Amino acid sequence: MNPTSPTSPTSPTPATPAEAIALGVAFLRAGNLDGAQNVFAQVLEHFPDHPDALHFAGILKARQGDGAGGIAMVRRAVALRPENAGAWNNLGNLLMREDRAEEAAVAYGECLARAPAYPEALANMGLLMRVAGDIDAAEEHYRRALAVRPDFPEALNNLGAIALARGDYAAAEVSLRRAVELEPTFSGARLNLGDLLTRQGRMKEAVANFWEQVVAGNGSGVAYKLLVYALVETGRHADALDVARRWIAEAPDDPAARHHFAALTGAAVPARAADAYVEGVFDAFAETFEASLGRLAYRAPALVAAEVARHLPPPDGTRTVLDAGCGTGLAAPLLKPYAARLDGMDLSAGMLERAAARGLYDHLEKAEITAAIAARPGAYDLIVCADTLCYFGDLVAVLAAAACALRKGGLFVFTVEALEGADAPAFRLHPGHGRYAHAPSHVHAAAIAAGLDVAALRPEDLRMEGAEPVRGLVVACRART
C-alpha cells in the first residue's frame, strides 16, 4: 500500500499500513487532527478491518467530539484483536469520558487480564476504586503501577491525594513533589500540593506553587481560588487583586471568579453567595469532604448537637427535624434520636448522594434553603444549620424563613463564623477564603427582626484552617409562642 497523505517536509510517504498508522498517530499526538483523519481514512478505505487503524481512528473520533462513535470503533478493534492490552485500556479511557464507569472497569479488567502489570490500567482501575470509596484497593493499584513505572506522575499524584486525605502530610508531600518534578505543568498534582501547603499554613510556598501554575496559563478555577487565598493570608492584597482580575478576565461567567472578585474589591458584594458558587464548591469537595474535615478538628455538627441537647429534653424520637445545609449528613446520627422524621436539604447533589448513603434521613432535597424552608410553614419542631450560614451575608431573610417553618416554641440552632471587634460591620465577606463572618450584634438583631427569641449565643472554635482556629458563634433561637 502507498496511500498519499499529508506529511511534514521530513516525513517520507508511508509504504505500508503500519507506517501509515504510525504517521497518523504522530499527527494525533501533535494535535494535527486533520492530518490524522486523512491518514486513518485512507488506511481504512483499503483495510476496513485493520484493528490498529480502527483503534487510533476511534481515539481521533472521540477527540473530535464523537465519543460514542469513537467507542464503537475501538470496540471493533478489540473484537478483532482482543490481545491488544493498550486498546482495552484506551477503550476504558473513552468510556470514562462518557461517564460509563462500569463499562470502563470491564475494559480495564480486560487490559489487566492480558497484561497484569500494565501501569496505566492499574492507575485507571485505582481511580475507579477511589471514586467508589475503596481507598485501600485504590492505593494498592497505584503502588503496583509505580512498581512497574516509578516515574509515573498520575499514579504519584493519586497516591499523594490518598495520603493527603488520610492526613499523612509527609507521605503526600513526597509523592506530590515528585509528580510535579516529573511534570511541572501537571495541574492536578500542583493543585494537590498547593492544597497540602495551604492546610499546613505554609502560605509562601503555596503562593510559589500556584503562581507558577497560573502564570503558565495552566490554572484551574480552584488554583486561582487557592492562590488568591494564599496571597491574602501573606498580606499581598494587591497581588491577590491582580490575580482575581486575570481570573475573571479568563472566566467572566465563572461564579467562583465573580464571588472572589467581589470579596477582594468590596464592590457588588452579594447578600449571600450565589447558588451556582456554593453548589460548585461542595460538588467538587464531596469526595474528600469528611476526610478533610476530620483533620481540621471540625466541630460544627457536634457543637450544634450539644446546643440542641441544652434546650430540649432527652431525645424521644417524636419531633419533626430539618438538617438545613446537611452536606454529607455528619449531623444526622446526632439528630436522628430526636426525630420521628428527619429531613435533609442541600444545594450539592454530590453531598446529598453521600448523605443518602447513611440511610438516616426520611427525605432529602436539593434546594436553596431560604426559599425551601419558607415554603414549609409550621412544619418543624427543630431546625439545625451547621456551618452553612457562612455563605450568607445579611441573615434576616434566612432566619425569617426558619421562623416561618418552625412550630410555636420550635428550636433553631445554627453556627456562623464570628466577626470580632467593637467597630466590626454587621457582616463581612472575607477577601481570601470567600466566606461571610458575622458580628454577634448582627446575629442577635437579625434573629429578633425575623421573629425569633435568642436563647443562647456563645463563641466557639468551629475548626482549624491554615493552622489557625476559625472562631465562630453557636446560636440557639426559639420561635415565639
Image: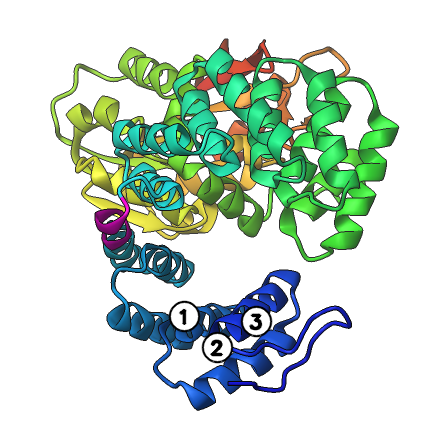
When the figure is inspected, residue 24 is found, relative to residue 182, above or below; the finding is below
Q: Which residue is mark 3?
A: 24
Magenta-highlighted stretch: main secondary structure?
A: helix
What are the residue bounds of the magenta stretch?
110-115
Check disc 1 and give the amino acid type: Asp
Which x, y percent locates residue 318? 13, 30
Which x, y percent locates residue 467? 58, 10
Which x, y percent locates residue 344? 30, 40
User: What residue lies at 38% left-to-right and 28% top-to-bottom?
Assistant: 147
Q: Which residue is mark 2?
A: 17
Tell which circle, 2 or 1, labels the residue nearer the N-terminal end.
2
Mark 3: few/some/many CA within 10 Å (<14, 14-19, 20+): many
Check disc 2 and give the amino acid type: Pro
Which x, y percent locates residue 206? 68, 22
Instruction: Identify the element where label 1 is drawn.
Output: helix
Mark 2: few/some/many CA within 10 Å (<14, 14-19, 20+): many
Tell me the distance, in whole angstroms, between the alpha carbons under discs 2 and 3.
10 Å
